[in-house]
Image (cartoon, rainbow, N blue to C red):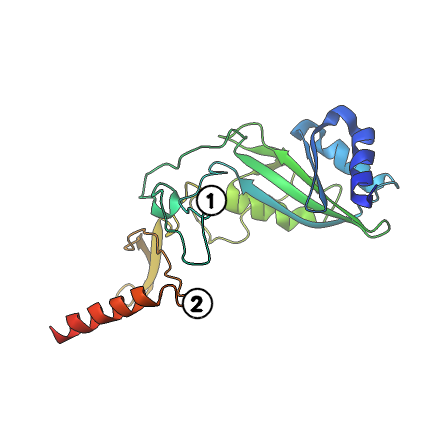
């Protein structure tokens, strides 16, 4: 039995019903716990010598609202070309006020924690879904790993996840007075406002964005020359246009 599988089995034995999921994939263990059990499970992960996850490597937020949905047909991509965008319905094309398609059957928001045990040379990933999609709340782990302070502030800033018990939960990356959470799937890629310096007012002013949201589909010219004919045709058309 591999060390990774042994870790998964030990976690299952230690936490039993508190684990909503326990998966071994790509040489890593990922467990899921409910918000009510998060603090207790993480405390034991740190203090139990069998696990000894004394170090928090990373913590981040995730928005699963469009998990499994894509406008790219990449499954059928071959060495002779590149598949094109096929579903013009995801957020790269969102207009202001549009809403994304919520296709996932998961809860929308989750916090993901990456832990390291130096003593045991092991890693584990812990995922916790917020129970309420409208007001996502997850317990803060700052009393367990003090280094999580800024990570939780980042997840709050970018995803709007509230970490209950955090002593100073405020934005850390966006500007003062910023509205919205830019990593949410329903936040337009071009944002809501753009800023410029106004020489008459002698200050920075904010205005609605003037960029038209769109998807730029790349053209891939492969070394085998499979797209050479198309490239030459495009260059010929461009030359004719210039002559005209």
- Do we see residue 50 in this rendering? yes
Q: Residue at x 45, y 42 (%)?
A: 185
Q: Is residue 183 above or below residue 38?
A: below
- Location of the N terminus by quadrant is top right
**Residue 223, percent from left and from top:** 44, 69
Q: Is residue 76 above or below residue 239?
A: above
Residue position marked by numbered label 1 in the rendering: 181
**Residue 68, percent from left and from top:** 49, 38
Nearest-to-viewer mark from 2 and 1? 2
**Disc with the residue nearer the chain's start (2 vs 1):** 1
Residue position marked by numbered label 2 in the rendering: 224
Q: Residue at x 78, y 26 (%)?
A: 16
Furthest toward the top, the residue is: 17
Which structural element holds mark 1?
loop
Asked whether, in this view, residue 169 is left or right of residue 78, the answer is: right
**Residue 120, percent from left and from top:** 85, 49
């Amino acid at each position: 039995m591999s060390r990774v599988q042994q870790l998964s089995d030990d976690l299952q034995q230690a936490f039993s019903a508190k684990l909503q999921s326990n998966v071994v994939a790509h040489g890593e263990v990922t467990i899921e716990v409910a918000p009510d059990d998060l603090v207790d499970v993480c405390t034991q992960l740190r203090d139990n010598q069998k696990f000894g996850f004394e170090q928090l490597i990373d913590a981040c937020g995730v928005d699963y609202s469009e998990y499994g949905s894509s406008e790219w047909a990449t499954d059928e991509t071959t060495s002779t070309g590149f598949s094109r965008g096929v579903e013009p319905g995801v957020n790269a094309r969102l207009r202001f006020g549009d809403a994304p398609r919520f296709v996932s059957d998961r809860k929308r928001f989750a916090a993901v924690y990456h832990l390291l045990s130096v003593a045991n040379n092991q890693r584990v990933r812990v995922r916790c879904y917020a129970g309420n999609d409208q007001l996502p709340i997850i317990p803060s782990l700052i009393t367990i790993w003090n280094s999580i302070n800024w990570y939780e502030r980042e997840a709050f800033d970018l995803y709007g996840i509230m970490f209950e018990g955090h002593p100073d939960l405020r934005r850390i990356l966006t500007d003062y007075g910023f509205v919205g959470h830019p990593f949410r799937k329903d936040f337009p890629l071009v944002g809501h406002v753009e800023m410029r310096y106004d020489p008459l007012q002698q200050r920075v002013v904010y205005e609605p964005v003037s960029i038209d949201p769109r998807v730029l589909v790349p053209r891939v010219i492969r070394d085998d020359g499979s797209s050479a004919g198309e490239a030459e045709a495009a260059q010929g058309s461009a030359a004719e246009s210039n002559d005209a």
